[in-house]
Amino acid sequence: MAGHKFHWNDWCPGCGNFGILSAEQQAITELGITNNTVIVGGIGCSGKLSQYTRIPVSGVHTLHGRAIPFAVGIKLANPSLEVIVNGGDGDLLGIGAGHFVSVGRRNVDIVVILHNNGVYGLTKGQAAPTLFRGMKTKSLPRPNINDAINPVTLALASGYTFVARAYAYDVPHLKEIIKQAIKHKGLAFVDILQPCPTYNDINTKEWYDKRVYKMQDMDPVVKSESEMQEKLKKAIDKSYEWGERIPIGIFYKNELVPTYEERIKTSAPSYYDNYPAEQKIEYEKKLTTIIDPLLEERKVAEDN
Amino acid sequence: MRISWMIGGAQGTGIDTSANIFGKVVSTLGYYIYGNREYHSNIKGRHSYFTLTISDKKVRSIPEKADILVSFDAETVLQHFNEIKGYIIYNEGVKGTKVETVQSMESEVAERISKQLESENLPKTVEGALESAKRRGVKLIPVNYDEIAKKVAEEAKVQLSVVERVKNVIGIAVSTKLLGINEEHLAKVAGSTFKQELYRKLNVMAIKKAYELTESVYSLPKLEGAPERYLLDGNTAVAIGKIYGGLRFQSYYPITPASDESMYIEAHQEVLMEDPKTGDKKKGAVVVVQAEDELAAVNMAVGAALTGIRSSTATSGPGFSLMVEGIGWAGMNEVPVVITYYIRGGPSTGLPTRTSQADLLFSLFAGHGEFPKIVVASGTHDEAFKDAVLTLNLAERYQTPVIHLVEKTLANSYTTVPKQDLGVGQLYADRGKLILSPPEDYARFQFTDDGVSPRAPLGKALMYYTGDEHNEYGFISEDPVNRNIIYEKRMKKLELADKEIPEEERVKVYGNVNSENVVITWGAPTGVFMDILEETKLDFALLQLRMFSPFPSRFVSKFLQGRKRIIAAEGNYLAQAGKIVKMNTGIEATNYILKWNGRPFLRDEVEEALRNVIEKDVKKVMLSGGS
Ligand SMILES: Cc1ncc(C[n+]2csc(CCOP(=O)(O)OP(=O)(O)O)c2C)c(N)n1
Ligand code: SF4
């Protein structure tokens, strides 16, 4: 792994991404899943995480906004892989917003991790979708003119079946949340509050340190169908809390919704026993798929 | 022998079903058919029609003028009376309909027809149009559909509304009688489309009454010894080809005329595989995802391909425009993925349901930066099937995106393909340098002599991918020396493909190879020229371009050397294939036969154009046939 060992990490000193990387690596290592984990990144400072891992997991650094579709393709072709998406708020909620929402309808068993820094880091600090209106971070020529998206609310409304928030500088807590997200059966989302010391001089480490607190009174787990609505409502209510106090922890967890993989199984029962990446489509160059019945349907014969 | 039949009517009124029944009737008698479907971008109400050529030999085109028109409504007569040379079967009830009252007709069409009828001193009505056709020698067959339906209802003692469903068979019956096909054969085929006994009975009664209306003028006896054949449209040919070729992931976002392919695959999602050595059979799934958009579709397909499986997507112009960035990523990361590109009329949403060949240059040059890309264009249905397998093979062998071009005409036309033409059993899988047990120190982009690196499925080894420039391990690298080497490695694969793929497979030649006239064409028009070669004495060689990248430069250049006339014939304004030929060989076309009105190349207009080019050396012909 010559190329692996010597790779340079070019995040700025003090960047919240370091905490995220470290927690993610620890979570994966502790779960013992390095061998079959794939980290899929978008584009941006955050997306490069897939290139910076110091543990032996594969990384796919994709296109701006498109990490989720890449991840879905990988997962559905080979459901035995653990697939984790990392993207910035520009990536996942700006250019990739359509995918972020749509994947919620599918409940694919992957993890989506948002590096939420309020800015477009890699293109030098433009306003990102989670930056509040009126805020003027240091590289903005004028105060931000757009309203902010609430990623936790959006994930809840989109159908994510595990929704949590964590803080980049509380690595032990973050690690636990990521572990839970990975273990969750279904689509998991972790909104990570990530200071960007270079461009976001408002939501700094000092700013967050004072505000974040761990939710104590929240029971996010849906235990029966009848609880779904009520727990979702509670989670959505809680997701609006922001300001002097910012809750971190798990907002919602529901394993009663069938995953997309399980849904495929209803129309193709052999899906898990012989999933695409395992299939033998040829044998010594001979194609193995039998298409006779398909052609038979099209056959021109007098008696049909 | 060649007879052409046309049926028209408002979309959603059973035109498709009628055309299917008719197609079945003639093909089960042993005849070859080639049918083309034309329709508006609309679900119900606008005019749509089917043209079908019937022949005792293989046929791949429709003529400009049909022998028989079956019509139920006023618009069908008005739209097509100029295109019929034999018989117009029409509904007596619509004779008095005025052109101006047909709301569904486009105003340009209505105006054109009105002007024509005016100039012929005829009333601007269906009757006027029929009279105009009659003056040209067309025979008119009036049918009182309502009267027949009423009689059937009375005899069968059912409500008139029940008979409504079998009304379409009346028009079919009149035409099969004209063709000399016996009543029982039609009843049997038509009956098989109805499950309920009542409808079968009503069918038989309606057919009987319709058969009394006319005399047989043609004679289509049952052909003996017809080979085993399949009825295939282009979409289905590609879909079955992909399944056979081992495709296991398909993502798409709905778009005409591409969606039918993916929907077919989804409907046949669970496939059976047989180990040829042990004979063991095993079921497996093809994952088909209807994505949220084309950006997702292409990137899901690319993601899936990373796991070592055969993966593809299908789209058409607007969708392909959105896919370009993802295709670039696949090129940069040497991912085998097939994009089936159904070409329709552009730019923008253009003519969404009509044909075109105007996206050739776009498909070839799609993507920023440089990366190898293979572009294959199918001309006929059996090619579409075989190319579905070929493109999957090429993608894996050269680890690069492959674009498979299929126009709307090919996608939506159907024909009878002899079993042996599909090559089932002879087609093979080439998985290139796929390795299932990669070494410890695996480098995904390892430098090799031929530029192709061993490819391990994601999950089987540690590996890194990035759309940024990278080193052998897939790590971002902006080093100028590495950039030179890895860039060349990627590009070199196209040179390898050029060396390895026989030029004869990339270009096909028909006709008199020594002729002073060479027609260069690609895609669906190929079939039209093949028919002309078989049916006329026109002297020309036909050069069908099947692969635009890597382009068979040596072959084409040698072939074109010293010819008097090089005729670029294609469905676009710029003569795009002609430009590609010039780019690769330095040889420029001398004459052009071009069409961009959204309608397919029609056999007779092409023959006439070709005569004008060959005999009178006309430089450029713009084809305008079709309605
Ligand atoms: C299609 C496309 N548009 C624009 C860019 C340029 N670009 C690179 S990074 C980036 C923004 C990244 O911001 P964010 O996703 O918030 O991630 P961060 O850098 O803050 O982690 C943009 C717009 C691109 N790579 N691709
Ligand atoms: S710009 Fe911000 S997000 Fe990017 S590396 Fe620097 S600190 Fe981190």
Image (cartoon, coloured by chain):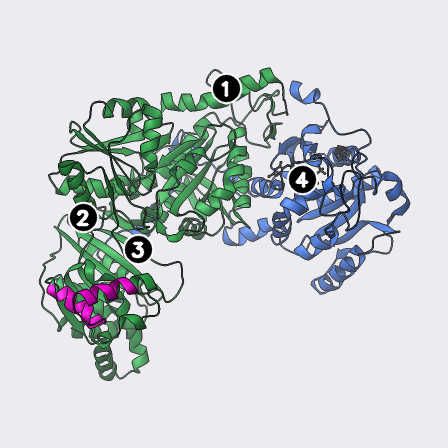
Relative to residue A120, is residue B353 drawn left or right? left
Q: Is residue A172 above or below residue B23?
A: above
Q: Is residue B72 above or below residue B577?
A: below
Would you say the residues marked 2 and 4 are in contact, meaning their CB atoms lie under 8 Å apart?
A: no
Would you say the residues marked 3 and 4 are in contact, meaning their CB atoms lie under 8 Å apart?
A: no
Amino acid on which the number 1 mark rests in the picture: Glu
Q: Chain for mark 4? A: A
Asked if marks 3 and 4 fall on the same chain, the answer is no
Residue ID for mark 2:
B604
Q: Closer to the N terminus: mark 2 or mark 3?
A: 3
Chain B colour is green
Q: CA distance from mark 1 to mark 4?
A: 32 Å
Q: Name the spot of residue A272 as percent of width and height, x first.
A: 55, 45
Q: Badge 1: few (under 14), some or many (20 or more) residues near its Cα, within 10 Å? A: few
Q: In the image, which is nearer the foreground, mark 1 or mark 2?
A: 2
Ligand 1 image position (quadrant): top right
Q: CA distance from mark 1 to mark 2?
A: 49 Å
In depth, the one of B195 and B346 nearer the eye is B346
